[in-house]
Amino acid sequence: MRYRRLGGGPLEVSELSFGTWLTVAGGVARDQAMRCIHAALDHGVNWIDTAAVYGLGHSEEVVARALAGRSERPYVFTKCALTWDDKGNITGALKADSIRRECENSLKRLKVDAIDLYQIHWPNPDVDVEEGWGALAKLKEEGKVRWIGVSNFDARQIERCRGIAPITSMQPPYSAISPAVEEAILPYCRQQGIGVIVYSPMKLGLLAGAMTKERVANFPQDDVRRRLPAFQEPQLSRNLALAELMKSIGARHGRSAGEVAIAWTLRNPAVTAAIVGMRSAEQAKGVMGALEFRLTAEEIAEIDGFRRGGDAIM
């Protein structure tokens, strides 16, 4: 098992985390979701990524149930700044009083005295970023949260927050299909000593090795992936070809395409760890090998050579 220190602080986190968005908020039954969580923890994962908005509170409640009675509890990282009304309409909210209410509700749902890492989920509305970050800093001073971070921020927004209180971590999307954060965010975070925990390293399943054009065509109408450019032509064919390349590289080592995709993100020295979503305990076992797997320099060059050829695959 490999662990890395998050943002220069005392938290040492496994290079993979269990992400609850795909599992709990993605319609997986509670008992199955709990088995996914247990499978990840049994393989050495020591932190869980969730958010209040995932399942409109349901995700945090499932995490609490899954961790009840375990002798060794993992760190729990959750997020704020997305609220919802009685009809389930979601709105960005960064006012201090709203952040505080969210924190209190998350503490109750998670059944903990303090949240290990509390993050602003999205920087919306932008005008309230400083107020929201100041609220997180106050919660940290009060001991309700131990560390504070941001998610989906740009470098300018991160810099604005750094003037108020230190940032432990940043959580951006990052994969071989969506590498945009390499341009500014990752170098900035590395320079400032901010930990980076990336999400969607397999690009919503595109790089897991099992995606096909037929499967994409049969996505339910409410599947968000139907509307994403990465799942539409001409990008889809190229992205599936990249997945096939990763599958062939993985086969040399007895690894899956998904493990190769995750290893590709972890090769970047700015990245602390990657968040992986799973819909079954079997899927958990299928990607946990990425905790021990490393790509060779030649394999990294092989992947990057494919990515540089032809049109960009954003």
Image: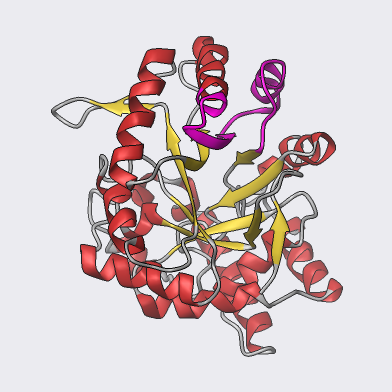
Q: Is residue 192 left or right of residue 248?
A: right
Instruction: Find residue 196 and report its horizontal and vertical position in percent.
Output: 67, 46
Which residue: 46% across, 16% down?
Answer: 125
Residues in magenta, as a range? 139-168
- Is the N terminus in the top left, top right, bottom left or bottom right quadrant? bottom right
Which residue: 66% across, 37% down?
Answer: 168
The quadrant holding residue 97 is top left
Instruction: Find residue 233 and report its horizontal and vertical position in percent.
Output: 47, 54
Name, please, the residue furthest toward the left. Answer: 87
Name, please, the residue furthest toward the top. Answer: 127
The quadrant holding residue 109 is top left
Q: Is residue 145 above or below residue 218?
A: above
Q: Is residue 38 above or below residue 233?
A: below
Q: Is residue 177 above or below residue 31?
A: above
Q: Is residue 22 left or right of residue 139?
A: left
Colour treatment of the image: secondary structure
- Asked whether residue 95 is in view, the answer is no
Q: Is residue 153 magenta?
A: yes
- Asked whether residue 13 is in view, the answer is yes
The tally of labels here is 0
Residue closest to the eye, 243 or 269: 269
Which residue: 41% across, 41% down?
Answer: 113
Residue closest to the eye, 111 or 160: 111
Q: Is residue 280 above or below residue 109?
A: below
Instruction: Find residue 239 and report its horizontal and vertical position in percent.
Output: 56, 62
Q: Is residue 58 magenta?
A: no
Instruction: Find residue 218 and report its horizontal and vertical position in percent.
Output: 27, 64
